[in-house]
Image (spheres, rainbow, N blue to C red):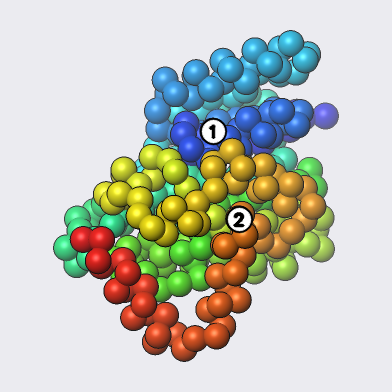
Amino acid sequence: MTERVTLITGASAGIGTELARVFASNGHRVALVARRADRLKALADELGAKAGAAGGATPIVIPCDLQQTDAGDKIAEALTAAGVEVEYLVNNAGFGLFGLAIERDRAEQLNVINVNIRALTDLTLRFADQLIRNRGGILNLGSIAGFLPGPGMAVYYASKAYVLSFSEALRCELAPKGVRVTVVCPGPVPSEFQDRAGFAPGFDSAILDVAPAEVARQAYRGLMANKRAVLPGAFIKLVPFLLRLFPRSFILTAVGGFQLRKR
């Protein structure tokens, strides 16, 4: 039987690194994808040492930039060369850009779509047959932003709304085929995300953030329990409920006022 792996994108930092550690510690062989080969190798060495001590297989390292349209081809070729199939797909890679959409660089904003939407969709559809054959699962990294309109980070918020909608619909489609689909929707998480997005954590981060390792643990447990969505943290769980109490126009004005004050 072909060996099965858990494919994790964005594995070189933050939640992605912690997800790799959680899956590996639970006996999964992981295939790690990210742009930074040096960080991937360091993580692979760390996980490989533990796997070797336990008699497990070493991680597969796939340096790859998901902004590029041929990223899916490169990932598939690397997995075929390693003689493995995908059992679990973890679409963790993603980034956002802070600022008015009309003022930010257009190419950069299209790359948000390339990573957060196109690559996630490509990998999901590309490996669907393997996921079904291995009766595995998909874990998509959404965000609490997916429940909201986001003036000040319009493209990012819209991309996470796609991830939420796509994950829920796919869950319905794949359930009869034995594939579980879970979306994890954290709030602000202390990581490199803020630096790349171009803003400093504020009050929202102070009250809503959950450490990357805890997000990863809750996400893994949620996927294995076949939960539809995981919202890490007590305050985050309240957000979808509170949103039902206010008109969309009010939410739009409130989020816009809060976000744009950061400028």
Residue drawn at 70 percent across, 62 percent down: 228
- Secondary structure beneath label 2: loop
Instruction: Please state which of the two labelled residues, at mark 1 or mark 2, is closer to the viewer.
Output: 2
Q: What residue does disc 1 label?
A: 17
Give left or right: position of 51 versus 177.
Answer: left
Q: Which quadrant holds the N terminus?
A: top right
Q: What residue does disc 2 label?
A: 233
How far across and down, in percent of the image, does residue 99 sit?
24, 61
Q: Which one is nearer the viewer's eye here, 177 or 202? A: 202
- Secondary structure beneath label 1: helix
Residue 159 visible from this viewpoint: no
Residue drawn at 69 percent across, 44 percent down: 220
| Residue found farthest to the left | 103
Determine whether 2 is above or below 99 in the image. above
Determine whether 69 is above or below 172 in the image. above
Task: Identify the amino acid type marked 1.
Answer: Thr
Which labelled disc corresponds to residue 120? none
Residue drawn at 77 percent across, 15 percent down: 54
Within 10 Å of disc 2 (Cα), the crowding (few <14, some 14-19, many 20+) is some
How far across and down, in percent of the image, does residue 259 sit?
31, 66
Residue drawn at 54 percent across, 48 percent down: 210
Residue 199 visible from this viewpoint: yes
Q: Which quadrant holds the C terminus?
A: bottom left
Give left or right: position of 263 versus 226.
Answer: left
* Sequence-first disc among 1 and 2: 1
Task: Identify the amino acid type marked 2.
Answer: Gly
